[in-house]
Image (cartoon, rainbow, N blue to C red):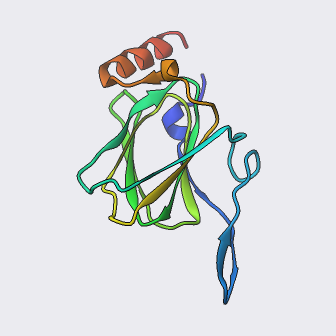
Amino acid sequence: MEQHNMNKVRMLEFAEHGDDRGHLVIVEGGIDIPFEIKRTFYIYGSKTDVVRGQHANKKTQFVLINVAGKSKVRVRDGEGNEAIYCLNRPHTGIYLPTMVWKDMYDFSEDSVLLVLASEHYDATEYIRDYGEFVRAIKGENENE
């Protein structure tokens, strides 16, 4: 039986290099990031009460890094399990595999959330309705 995708979610820690001039963090696709990076974007200016994400992806894997400020990420598996991660250090990130539901929220005023993606944007591989996501997960589990 295949490992459940929720169990693949994990925090990543990146090496910090620095001296009296400041810090440098390097993240390379296929080395520090568990996939080759095809798309990068960042989210900033979100109010504290805003919830971003609210979707699952059939093909895309993500790594989220708060390069400034902080935010939280709630990950759900569609079977009643969830975990909450706090992104508050610029040298840590969270790896999100395919087919997990993600909500980003509780943004600090200075939050800049960097998102690294394994695929180019394709609207057809996004599941934006939680009920549809749950049905897709149940269908996957029946086929195992």
**Above or below, comparing residue 118 to residue 108 in the picture:** above
Instruction: Find residue 70 and report its horizontal and vertical position in percent.
Output: 40, 63
Instruction: Find residue 142 and report its horizontal and vertical position in percent.
Output: 47, 11
**Above or below, comparing residue 43 to residue 87 in the picture:** above
- Horizontal arrangement in the rendering, residue 65 relative to residue 30 (left or right): left
Image quadrant assignment for residue 45 = bottom left
Residue lying at 67% horizontally and 90% vertically, measured from the top left = 20
Q: Residue furthest front?
A: 45
Residue lying at 49% horizontally and 22% vertically, measured from the top left = 123
- Horizontal arrangement in the rendering, residue 30 relative to residue 88 (left or right): right
- Horizontal arrangement in the rendering, residue 82 relative to residue 23 (left or right): left
Q: Residue furthest bottom?
A: 20
Q: Residue furthest left?
A: 49
120, 72: nearer the viewer: 120
Image quadrant assignment for residue 132 = top left
Q: Quadrant of the C terminus?
A: top right
48, 45: nearer the viewer: 45
Q: Quadrant of the N terminus?
A: top right
**Above or below, comparing residue 56 to residue 53 in the picture:** above
Residue lying at 30% horizontally and 56% vertically, measured from the top left = 106
- Horizontal arrangement in the rendering, residue 28 relative to residue 66 (left or right): right
Instruction: Find residue 102 and report its horizontal and vertical position in percent.
Output: 41, 38
